[in-house]
Image (tube, rainbow, N blue to C red):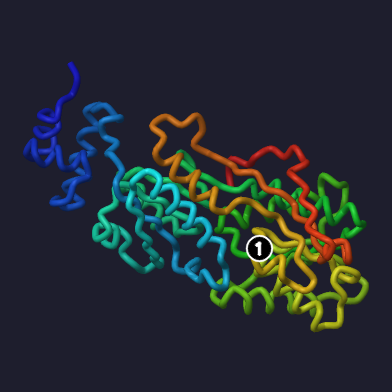
């Protein structure tokens, strides 16, 4: 015999009305009571499809370190995609930014969402707290086992960037990276290192520089690049730089020009993300591009899918060639090279 809400009420020691409100994610209950009811329902084998509430409100959760849209506009485009997808489906989105010392569960209670979309890095404790709410959850530009995730094909993008540089005999390629706790950065670093192995080239770990996450993004990248060049001699200096994002790549360009280095004649530079400033730099920046709004749209689609064919979605990237790697060629127009390598997707960070 199928489990009924009366069975759940008895197991959770609450009223039938409380069970109904808990399973429909309606207001008027404490979070502890709602979780107790949901746990009882699952324990009794209540139909999981009936446990999934109709989603009317979605909270887009962003770590405070990402909430500088002016300096790093990547996540503003992702948010636009989420908002667009929600608007098309009659869902009301809200934005919540939180840091590691804040009570995320309490803040979510005020938002009262039916579902949550998390973008970018969050601490493991925060992610565990979000999973514990029992609400439908999707990760965007983030990965965790057994959760619905939408990411760019970051490793393949790094491979494209490196193959482009290698094709011009740039083999002393430095990498400007951030914390490997960020899934996308870790995947880009993996692609960077693997490219040397696949090309039969020697990898020099001294050419990797990591930014200080406690500083503003541009300043942190600038200091990392300065440290990198100060530690090199003329003999072992890089002749190319692959930066984990365009903000770091543009900072690299400014440091190189200030040191009297020519871009790209002395140092070729490739970024990642194709933010608007990339095309307007002097010289324009070669970068790895992807549809950032599509990340948000696809995240909402995956969240709403009752039985997705794959819960680990990767969106394609492309190499946009501009003058920071090919000189005057880039001033005549952007050359777009669609993904041209067969790189297996990574399923673990």
Q: Where is residue 336 in the image (x, y as percent from the top left)?
A: 77, 51
Q: Quadrant of the N terminus?
A: top left
Q: Residue furthest top?
A: 1
Q: Where is residue 78 in the image (x, y as percent from the top left)?
A: 51, 56
Determine the residue positioned at 45% across, 59% down: 123
> Dot 1 corresponds to which residue?
245
In the image, is residue 10 above or below residue 195? above
Residue situated in front as seen by the camera: 215 or 167: 167
In the image, is residue 183 above or below residue 40? below
Question: Horizontally, is 133 left or right of 292 in the view?
Answer: left
Question: Horizontally, is 248 left or right of 230 in the view?
Answer: left
Determine the residue positioned at 83% across, 65% down: 331
Total numbered labels placed on residues in the image? 1
Determine the residue positioned at 30% across, 50% down: 57
The kind of secondary structure element at disc 1 is loop
Residue situated in front as seen by the camera: 187 or 318: 318
Q: Position of residue 192 (x, y in %)?
A: 74, 54
Determine the residue positioned at 83% across, 62% down: 330
In the image, is residue 57 above or below residue 286? above
Q: Where is residue 216 in the image (x, y as percent from the top left)?
A: 56, 77
Q: Quadrant of residue 14?
A: top left
Tell me if mark 1 has few (under 14), some (14-19) or many (20+) residues whose alpha carbon lies within 10 angstroms of its own: many
Q: In which quarter of the image is residue 320?
A: bottom right
Question: Horizontally, is 119 left or right of 180 in the view?
Answer: left
């Amino acid at each position: 015999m199928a489990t009924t809400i009366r069975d759940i009420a008895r197991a959770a020691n609450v009223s039938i009305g409380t069970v109904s409100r808990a399973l429909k994610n309606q207001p008027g209950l404490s979070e502890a009571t709602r979780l107790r009811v949901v746990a009882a329902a699952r324990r009794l084998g209540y139909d999981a499809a009936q446990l999934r509430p109709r989603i009317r409100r979605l909270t887009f959760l962003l770590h405070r370190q990402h909430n500088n849209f002016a300096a790093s506009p990547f996540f503003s485009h992702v948010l636009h995609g989420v908002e667009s997808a929600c608007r098309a489906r009659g869902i009301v989105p809200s934005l919540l930014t939180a840091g590691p010392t804040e009570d995320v569960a309490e803040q979510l209670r005020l938002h009262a969402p039916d579902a949550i979309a998390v973008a970018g890095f969050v601490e493991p404790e925060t992610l565990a707290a979000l999973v514990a709410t029992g609400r439908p959850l999707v990760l965007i530009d983030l990965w965790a086992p057994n959760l619905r995730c939408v990411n760019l094909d970051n490793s393949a993008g790094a491979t494209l960037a490196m193959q482009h540089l290698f094709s011009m005999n740039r083999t002393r390629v430095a990498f400007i990276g951030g914390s490997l706790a960020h899934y996308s950065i870790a995947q880009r670093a993996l692609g960077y290192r693997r490219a040397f192995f696949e090309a039969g080239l020697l990898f020099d770990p001294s050419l990797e520089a990591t930014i200080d996450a406690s500083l503003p993004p541009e300043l942190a990248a600038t200091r990392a690049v300065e440290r990198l060049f100060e530690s090199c001699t003329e003999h072992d200096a890089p002749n190319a730089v692959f930066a984990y994002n365009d903000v770091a790549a543009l900072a690299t360009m400014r440091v190189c020009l200030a040191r009297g280095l020519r871009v790209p004649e002395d140092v070729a530079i490739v970024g990642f993300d194709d933010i608007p400033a990339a095309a307007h730099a002097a010289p324009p920046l070669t970068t790895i591009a992807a549809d950032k709004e599509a990340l948000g749209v696809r995240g909402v689609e995956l969240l709403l899918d009752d039985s997705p064919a794959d819960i680990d979605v990767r969106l394609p990237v492309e190499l946009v060639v501009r003058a920071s790697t090919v000189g005057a060629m880039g001033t005549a127009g952007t050359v777009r090279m669609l993904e041209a390598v067969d790189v297996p997707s990574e399923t673990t960070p």
